[in-house]
Amino acid sequence: MDSTLYGEMGTGKLRARTLDRIDRKILAELQTDGRLSLAELAVRVGLSASPCLRRVRALEEAGVIARYVAVLDQRAVGLPVSVFISIKLESQREEALEHFNRGVAHWPEVLECYLMTGPRDYLLRVVVADLEAYERFVKTKLTRLAGIASIESSFALGQVKYTNVLPLG
């Protein structure tokens, strides 16, 4: 299955690019291990180094590969508590949504923030060291952000599955 994606050319115009089987293999390998050498990646996907590098660069330029990161174990770094927070705003006007977005964007405890459909406006995933750290987060950050009507917290008891690998088929 091929997918069309769009990347910016130097002129700011969009150009179409199709993800073929080799692109998908490259992406699958890099999602599993972003530190693969170009030589090892090329071997795994059945290309020589130069065409493999051209494809990786094209995927980066098109924005398919957004960045390379190290995935940390949240317990190992002292942040074992995950909290899912549902937020209802007083208003759903564009200005209110943008105000909330700007406020949340700078809080390192918030790993994910989604604008939602349904009875709540936002769903956040927050990580903290302990219950006291969560209380500080709520009191010093969340409740000080104007426009919030209600906050509901759910504490994760355990993680059943976590992945950042997209199912490319």
Image (spheres, helix red, strand yellow):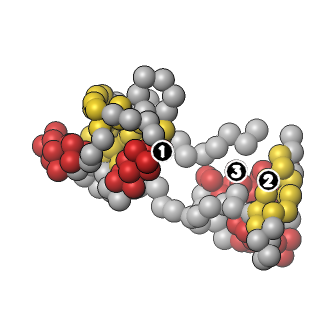
Furthest toward the left, the residue is: 132
Whether residue 25 sits left or right of residue 88 in the image: it is right
Q: Position of residue 15 (x, y in %)?
A: 85, 62
Q: Residue at x 16, y 45 (%)?
A: 139
Residue 37 - label: none
Q: Position of residue 88 (x, y in %)?
A: 35, 31
Q: Nearer the viewer, mark 1 or mark 3?
A: 1
Residue 5 - label: 2
Q: Which residue is mark 1?
A: 94
Q: Judging from the image, what secondary structure is the residue with disc 3 in?
A: helix
Query: How many numbered marks have been drawn onto this rendered protein structure?
Result: 3
Q: Badge 1 local density, few (<14 within 10 Å), some, or many (20+)?
A: few
Q: Could one spot residue 128 in this view of the protein?
A: no
Q: Badge 3 local density, few (<14 within 10 Å), some, or many (20+)?
A: some
- Asked where in the image residue 46 lies, by quadrant, the reply is bottom right
Q: Is residue 133 above or below residue 23?
A: above
* Discs 1, 2 touching: Cβ within 8 Å: no
Nearer-the-camera pick, 156 or 12: 12
Q: Earlier in the sequence, mark 1 or mark 2?
A: 2
Please state which amino acid type lies under the numbered disc 2. Answer: Leu
Q: Quadrant of the N terminus?
A: top right
* Discs 1, 3 touching: Cβ within 8 Å: no
Q: Could one spot residue 164 in this view of the protein?
A: yes
Q: Which residue is mark 3?
A: 28
Q: Residue at x 86, y 71 (%)?
A: 51
Whether residue 119 sits left or right of residue 50 in the image: it is left
Please state which amino acid type lies under the numbered disc 1. Answer: Glu
Q: Is residue 28 above or below residue 120?
A: below
Q: Judging from the image, what secondary structure is the residue with disc 2 in?
A: strand
- Asked where in the image residue 36 lies, by quadrant, the reply is bottom right
